[in-house]
Amino acid sequence: MPQKPRPADYNKPPELLRTSAYDQVSSLLISLLILVGTAVAMLVVIFITGRVFRMPAPPMMLLVEEESGTQNPPGTAQDINEPGIEELEDLAEPDVKDTLAAVTDAVSTVAASLDAVEGVVATRGKGMGDNRKRGNGEDVIPRWERWEIRYTSTTLEAYAKQLEFFQIELGAISPARAAIEYATFRNGVPTKRPADPNVEEDRLYFSWQGRASKFKDQDMTLLRQAGINTAGAIICQFYSKELENVLANVELNKRGDRPLKDIKKTIFGIQPGGSGFEFVVVDIRWR
């Protein structure tokens, strides 16, 4: 039987497997993707491990204290007498000892006071009794007796920025004129604000302690810049209810679990922090 002729391609050797150009390009792309993914993963790990995670601050609580009350007759205002000799400006030139003491004292202290004033200051001898309530609270020293604020030495401009940041108003209480005049701040410039006779002043205010104080002089300078006469006036700083609550929370975080009645004196300071400044507890003196 005759054999059929074989096709011409039948006698060719079989082709070996080869990598095509498509395979080369695709493998190169896959390798690049793996390298890029690995690099991105390493950068993410470095970013996460290098960050400092902070727990969000707990919401600020509104702290209300129960005062121990008073035995004085109830009233709506307390007497604010004319300033004594120790509160008047010295006309005589101070001696070298007093000058050195004033220069070396880089920190001034303000003691708090919380009295209600009926619109304007009551004239001397015509007060209406003690406005502090009677109560059965614990033996807790009230805020206006236990709180102090200490300012560090700074320029007048920086000091005005601190007062503006905390929305602290300066006040000049004049018993002679039976009036209170305030100075508010905007862009570091003090502006005069007269008292509203229809609004009862019940904010926490601070008065300077001692005869010589750099920051008391700065308060008087800022008041005069606002057009307020400070001659014979009592210089005060008025704190809003919100700022008073901030101080109370700072004090609470510092004292921890110890009862409030154990505190004799809380001394606050101011330091840069957050968007501007913040209050910190410098020291707590216990009973």
Image: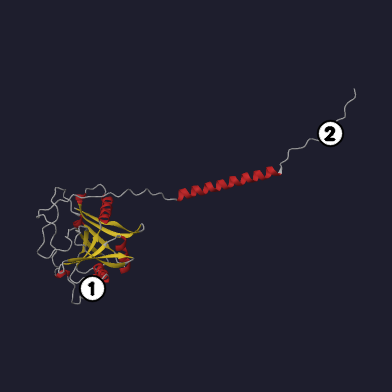
- For label 2, the SS is helix
Residue closer to the observer: 45 or 85: 85
The quarter holding residue 124 reads: bottom left
- For label 1, the SS is helix
Viewed as shown, does residue 69 lie left or right of 147? Answer: left
Q: Residues within 10 Å of mark 2 (few under 14, many from 20)?
A: few
The quarter holding residue 221 reads: bottom left
Q: Residue placed at 28% from the left, 50% from the top? A: 253
- Identify residue type, mark 1: Thr
Residue 155 in view of the camera: no
Q: Residue placed at 46% from the left, 48% from the top? A: 49
Residue 157 image offset from top left, x and y in percent: 32, 68
Quick check: 87 above or below 51?
below
Q: Disc 1 marks which residue?
A: 99
Residue 150 image offset from top left, x and y in percent: 26, 62
Question: Residue furthest toward the bottom?
Answer: 93
- Identify residue type, mark 2: Asn
- The residues bearing labels 1 and 2 have C-alpha atoms spaced at a distance of 119 Å
Question: Residue furthest toward the right?
Answer: 2
Residue closer to the observer: 50 or 137: 137
Q: Residues within 10 Å of mark 1 (few under 14, many from 20)?
A: few
Residue closer to the observer: 90 or 133: 133
Which callout, 1 or 2, points at the residue further toward the start of the chain?
Answer: 2
Q: Disc 2 marks which residue?
A: 11
